[in-house]
Image (cartoon, rainbow, N blue to C red):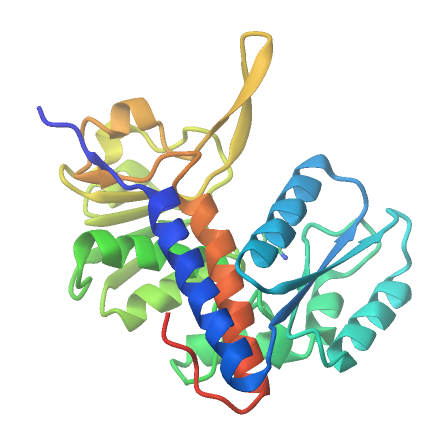
């Protein structure tokens, strides 16, 4: 049996970041605008620190400005809200990202709701979620689902009429991705922890996206032969006396059945960051009354 094509998210993300870099250079040359991204990290969570550092570094490599705000774990909600308010009013900040999860005692919905929707480069504000859900123009689209969609279109071309299964119903991935896939004319199923007979549901899916947060949960024998599998999971599991990253899909069995599959690492993860840079560029252009750049 032939093995699945392994979709190279790193390569596609590099292309996208280079496109953002070219568009950012054009924005600076033609309009004197340098897009600025503010990243806010509350607390000391190691994984979050690594993501945030990587977001800032990638922004600078693409010619954007990056502003880092590190706040202590015991920050009061009102102090975080005051920072968000300042960033909303800062002219050199075009995008604001508050890294999640936030420490207990701070309401994520209050913080996300305080971000100016025009600077909400995560696309989590209800205004952007509503625009996406209603198919209206002007949404800033959440980065991980946007990255998944780009990977799917890169591999499959048109998605129209395909059965797409999204496993996971989070506001960050599952729900916005379902909206994007509907927009591409897929027949969309959203499965979750209470779904009955997930293997039978999976067997009908031409596209299967796993965003469950459970290491290697989706098994090869659930997958429709030839299906395109997108693995959003990033799970750290023990490996001898060290640890390693694995996805929500059991790659070893899935690669024997799927037509194409994203690896972990090197699949969706790099696309998420590239899409964040793209959103920051789009947000900056819109804030200056310019057309969305072609990237
Ligand atoms: N934590 C995990 N993923 C994300 C993301 O896409 N954005 C933010 N702000 N926090 C996250």
Camera-nearest residue between 133 and 150? 150
Q: In this view, does 235 lie to the left or right of 188?
A: right
Query: Is 238 drawn above or below residue 134 in the view shown?
Result: above
Camera-nearest residue between 96 and 236? 96
The outermost residue toward the left is: 1
Q: How many marks?
A: 0
Q: Where is residue 199 in the image (x, y as percent from the top left)?
A: 28, 36
Residue at 47 percent of width and 45 percent of height:
269
Residue at 73 percent of width and 81 percent of height:
91
Residue at 59 percent of width and 82 percent of height:
32
Residue at 56 percent of width and 52 percent of height:
58
Q: In this view, does 71 lie to the left or right of 138?
A: right
Q: Which quadrant would the N terminus be assigned to in this image?
A: top left
Quarter assignment of residue 176: bottom left
Q: Position of residue 53 (x, y in %)?
A: 66, 46
Work out whether residue 1 can be spotted: yes
């Amino acid at each position: 049996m032939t093995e699945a094509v392994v979709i190279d998210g790193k390569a596609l993300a590099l292309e996208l970041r280079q496109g953002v870099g070219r568009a950012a250079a054009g924005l600076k040359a033609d309009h004197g605008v340098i897009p600025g991204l503010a990243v806010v990290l509350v607390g000391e969570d190691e994984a979050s620190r690594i993501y945030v550092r990587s977001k800032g570094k990638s922004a600078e490599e693409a010619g954007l400005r990056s502003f880092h705000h590190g706040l202590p774990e015991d920050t009061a909600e009102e102090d975080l809200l005051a920072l968000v308010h300042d960033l909303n009013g800062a002219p050199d900040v075009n995008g604001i990202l508050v890294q999640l999860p936030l420490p207990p005692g701070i309401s994520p919905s209050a913080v996300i709701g305080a971000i100016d929707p025009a600077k909400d480069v995560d696309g989590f504000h209800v205004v952007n979620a509503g625009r996406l859900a209603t198919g209206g123009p002007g949404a800033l689209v959440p980065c991980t689902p946007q990255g998944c969609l780009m990977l799917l279109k890169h591999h499959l071309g048109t998605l129209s009429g395909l059965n797409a299964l999204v496993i996971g119903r989070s506001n960050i991935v599952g729900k916005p991705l379902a909206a994007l896939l509907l927009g591409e004319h897929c027949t969309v199923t959203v499965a979750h922890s209470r779904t009955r007979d997930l293997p039978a549901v999976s067997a009908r899916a031409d596209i299967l996206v796993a965003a469950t947060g459970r290491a290697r949960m989706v098994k090869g024998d659930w997958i429709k032969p030839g299906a395109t599998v997108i693995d959003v999971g990033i799970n750290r599991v023990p490996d001898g006396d060290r640890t390693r990253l694995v996805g929500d899909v059991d790659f070893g069995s899935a690669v024997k059945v799927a037509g194409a599959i994203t690896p972990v690492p090197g699949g969706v993860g790099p696309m998420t960051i590239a899409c964040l840079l793209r959103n920051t560029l789009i947000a900056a252009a819109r804030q200056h009354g310019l057309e969305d750049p072609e990237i």
